[in-house]
Image (spheres, rainbow, N blue to C red):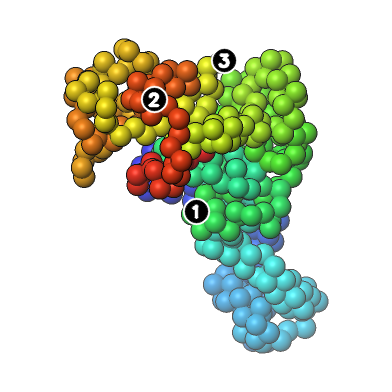
Amino acid sequence: MASWGRRLLVNLRYLRALMRRFRTTLLLALALYGVGPLLFHWRYVGPSGEGVSFGEALHHVYFLLFGQPSLPYVNDWLVETLNFVIPPVGIALVADGVVRFAYLFFARHKNDKEWVAVVSETMKGHVVVCGAGRVGYRVVTQLREMGRDVVVVEKREDAAFVSALRDENVPLLIDDTRSPLCLPRTHVKHASAIVCATDDDLANLNIALDARRLNPDIRVVIRLFDDDLGAKVRDTFHVEALSSSSLAAPAMALAALDPRIIHSFRIAQHLMVVSLFEVREGLTGMTVAQVRDRFGALALSLHRGPQELLNPAGDECLRAGDLVTLQAPYPEYQRLRAFTHESPPPAWADRDNFLMPGHRDVG
């Protein structure tokens, strides 16, 4: 949906939601400006015996709000009762109802749950991220860079990245995830995935179960600190349960052994590593396809002078001085380093100096 179309739809839906919320105020306003003038039109008889039109009665009711009646005094109990009742009722209506209604509609109060709920209703296939801490914020940033719509839920107003998310105009719902209305406000029934990234294992598990109940087909990703619990949850509920320690452990271990490794991850039982190679002895003259076939190493990028090629073609021939980023299983990586006669990490190896710009560790 085009951005202008989405904004228009959001505004219309939000207006409808506000009208539901302020229905008592709207009914009182209707009674004040509809029934009030009708009563004056029906009952009021001036000192000279003349009546008043509906327009004159409406004018009188409007100025009564400011304590300035426009019709002369008459000795009629109903008319005088209206003259005494309408000012305080009207002031309360304007101060408490109309002003708040206008403020919520035009100011788009960022803490308003109804506003977040309406914005979420315009989305389909979006991702719900629970937790506005460091992990949650990085997940949101990555998803938005990939062009995905995101709705964030956070329990605490003072969470680390609440202000940053609001500055970036990310829909942010401040609510307790245990509330039965919390996840429905994020339109989770039509979301494609939910990421449970709070710092509480039990809360993340509860969120995941509630989301799966509301949307059986949703993809669930849970951050769990307990590795054993993560394995049980993954096998029992068929969700992606990730432990910070299990993700960080391979990277930390390999960084201790070989600072030339800039990233690592596991695929089933295979430990995969990403490293930057300077084409020197051995690799010079080989093609990207030959490196892949001989060592199982995929070329992710190739730096040649100022030029950078992402996913270089298989027939690209490596030249001396090229910088190639390769991904390979750890044993094959070791074999490739041995082939280039540089298997032990050099004593000077320092990741911040060894990596070229654009190849910093993202782990």
Position of residue 66 measured from the top left corner of the image (x, y, whole percent): 65, 82
Position of residue 281 measured from the top left corner of the image (x, y, whole percent): 27, 27
Query: Dot 1 lies on which element?
Result: loop
Q: Nearer the viewer, residue 302 or 320?
A: 320
Does 74 sit above or below residue 265?
below
Q: CA distance from mark 2 to mark 3?
A: 22 Å
Q: Which residue is mark 2?
A: 337
Q: How many marks?
A: 3
Position of residue 169 measured from the top left corner of the image (x, y, whole percent): 50, 53
Query: Dot 3 lies on which element?
Result: loop
State which quadrant residue 317 falls in: top left
Q: Residues within 10 Å of mark 1 (few under 14, many from 20)?
A: few
The first of marks 2 and 1 along the sequence is 1
Looking at the rendered structure, the kind of residue marked 1 is: Asn
Q: Which residue is mark 3?
A: 269
Q: Which residue is mark 1?
A: 169
Q: Quadrant of the N terminus?
A: top left
Q: Nearer the viewer, mark 1 or mark 3?
A: 3
The first of marks 1 and 3 along the sequence is 1
Query: Dot 2 lies on which element?
Result: helix
Q: Are marks 2 and 3 in contact (CB under 8 Å)?
A: no
